[in-house]
Image (cartoon, grey):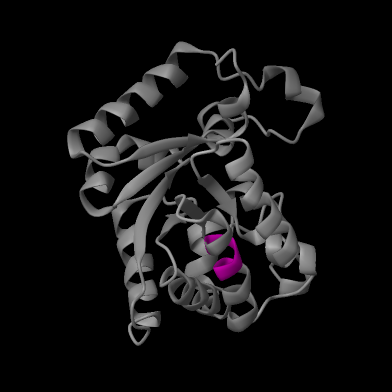
Amino acid sequence: SMAAAEVTCRDCHEVAAEGVGLYRTEFEILAAGRALSEDEQYAVYRNTIEALQGLPLCARLLDLGADKDAPFLDLPAEDNPGLGFRGARLLLGRPDLLIPQVRAMARASAHGRVNLIYPMIVDVDQFLILRERIRQAINDIPGHNLTHGVMFEVPSACLIARELFEVADFASIGTNDLIQYLFAIDRNNERIASDYDPDKPVFWNLLGELARAGKEANKPLSLCGEIGGQPQF
């Protein structure tokens, strides 16, 4: 995993990429098939930062649950996992996962800034509570260089984008889940896959509102998800 991350980041320079917009950190533990210690995660993150040679890195905190099941973490079985114990809820409820990761990320950020993306944020209070937990966990680590951002993928967060931009350093639009929640469509259900289409006025209007909120706050806003790589969009 460490070697793969490092090679991928070096490839960024070869294709003239401008950085890593969404580092899905949960893939590291899913690939390992076990939880990684703080030191193991630090080694991965430091290698990634150094391989980027100054290009920006946006790293999403562990986004587990729903379609990213990790049996070795003993997560609860749920009838509706897409609406359950995942994202920010899971991070707040599982300090054994959150604290080693953020401490490793803070240590690694001494070698280059890391923009932390908070997954599945639903409102301002949740963001502030999670940010405070993180700040307390890394308080004793010198020289860390982290910014704290929101992933816009839950409609409730999108509707209060201006309030979230007041407290967050940046934001990213998670289009995969946003489309799923906005249109009440399971993106992993083959029977309705043909209906998974964002090209509707309500979706573009929502993205426009997010863009305006980011511009008004003078905060960076990026976009991730499958449609970001589809030229027709």
In the image, is residue 48 part of the stretch drawn in magenta?
yes
Q: Is 21 displayed left or right of 196 in the figure?
A: left
Residue 194 or 221: which is nearer the viewer?
221
The residue under the point 58% across, 49% down is: 83
Q: Quadrant of residue 52?
A: bottom right
In the image, is residue 103 part of the stretch drawn in magenta?
no
Q: From this viewpoint, is residue 72 visible?
A: yes
Q: Quadrant of residue 183?
A: top right
Residue 178 or 3: which is nearer the viewer?
3
Magenta span: chief secondary structure: helix
Residue 61 x %, y %: 52, 61
Residue 28 or 132: which is nearer the viewer?
28
Labels in figure, total: 0
The residue under the point 58% across, 81% down is: 38
Residue 229 sits above or below residue 49 on the image: above
Segment tinted magenta in the rendering = 45-49
Residue 167 x %, y %: 24, 54
